[in-house]
Image: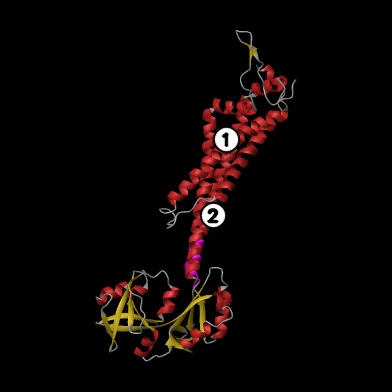
Amino acid sequence: MARRQKLLRSESPDRSGQRTPSPRSLTFRDIAFGNLKRRRGRTAFLILSLTVGVAMMVAVISVTAAMRASVESKLREYGANMVVLPRGLEMPITYGGVNIASVKAPIGELTEQDATLVASIHRKDAIRGVSPKLVTAIRIDEQEFMMVGVRFRDELRMKPWWTISGDKPALSREVLLGRTAAQQLNRRPGDSLAMGGKDFRVVGVLDEQFSAEDHAIFADLRETGLLFNSPGKVSFIEVSTWCAACPVETIVEQVSEKLPGARVFAVKQLVEAELSQVRLATGFALTLTAIILVVGTLIMLLTMMASVRERTQEIGVLRAIGFRQAHIMRLILTEGVVVTFIGGGIGVIAGSAAALALSGPVAGLESPPLFDWPVAGVALGLAITMGALPAAYAARKACQLDPTIALRSL
């Protein structure tokens, strides 16, 4: 028998006696595609199962990658904030062995000079900004408000997410009002505001922040100190770093060395909570995706094995006309790879479209994830692997069929 990979049809004479060339040769591709066409329902089911698994994997990876990028972008923008507070002494009051109260007394106090010391630490290159603040209560029009003295240049640099209606304060007698404070005081940008016998000008109103800042009046730090007889004093110092990967613990240690009479805290709870939620959602989605992929691989294996059993006669004929075991294996593998390539390609497109559509309403992302070629390549490669392994096992079983036994079933 001829050792060829093609089944050739001999030339036949036509009515005029001339020999005409036979139709095109029958190749492995013809046999493989012919089998897939004959079993359209099974082929469509395999493609659908692979499409679902690959689409979910691409969508999950794309959305979670975009979520991580969004969090990292916020961290790069906002920094990992730290707060420097004056150290205090807490003395419990007990009576009859029962703790009934406690008295807190300040041991030290912070000044603007301390903010300069913070900015001079060894890792000052990682510090984005240092903003000292003096916080106190003030009564205006029979209402209590929180007044925050800041250095506006430093404060606005540290909080780029602030949106201000009006102008940014530039002079010492200009103030910025929180949204709720502006409504209670009935003040708009351009209005005057009397505090402590001095006239200030409202130049801007801070958009709603859903925090204590909505009730605050922001004024110049030195003007606030003079207003409350605390020149040069600050309530606390806020520090922010340039990046999420900056050594916050090292910076805290160096600031503590510079200011031994202060307490330094790293404010990372919000960031850690958001990252934790992203990791939790990613882990759950990837676990579900892995289960779907495993199920898809098992479906592929069972379907390919059933196909081999149904094609016993066909395999026997092919072996009888000269096909070797390697040819049979190549034929089965070709069918499996074609199915998985189609399913993987459709899954990549569907997963990218799903990530684009769900990134806003589900993940809350402002900017949709872009098409990720590496992710698409990995997903397509994984899909082909998912099809190649079951197909290889089924092809091995097909190669072990005895051609004489297969021909007896004809």
Cα–Cα gap, marks 2 and 1: 29 Å
| Residue marked by disc 1 | 339
Locate residue 331, reporting x and y percent.
65, 30
Direction from residue 235 to residue 340 in the image, left or right: right
Numbered range of the magenta stretch: 267-277
Which disc is residue 283 wearing?
2
Residue at horizontal 29 percent and vertical 81 percent from the top: 201
Q: Earlier in the sequence, mark 2 or mark 1?
A: 2
In which quarter of the view is residue 390 placed?
Answer: top right
Direction from residue 100 to residue 374 in the image, left or right: right
Q: Where 355 sits versus 298, above or below?
A: below
Locate residue 68, reporting x and y percent.
51, 59
* Magenta run includes residue 273: yes
Give the amino acid type for the residue marked by disc 2 in the picture: Gly
Locate residue 5, reporting x and y percent.
69, 26
Residue at horizontal 51 percent and vertical 77 percent from the top: 265
Camera-nearest residue between 28 and 59? 28
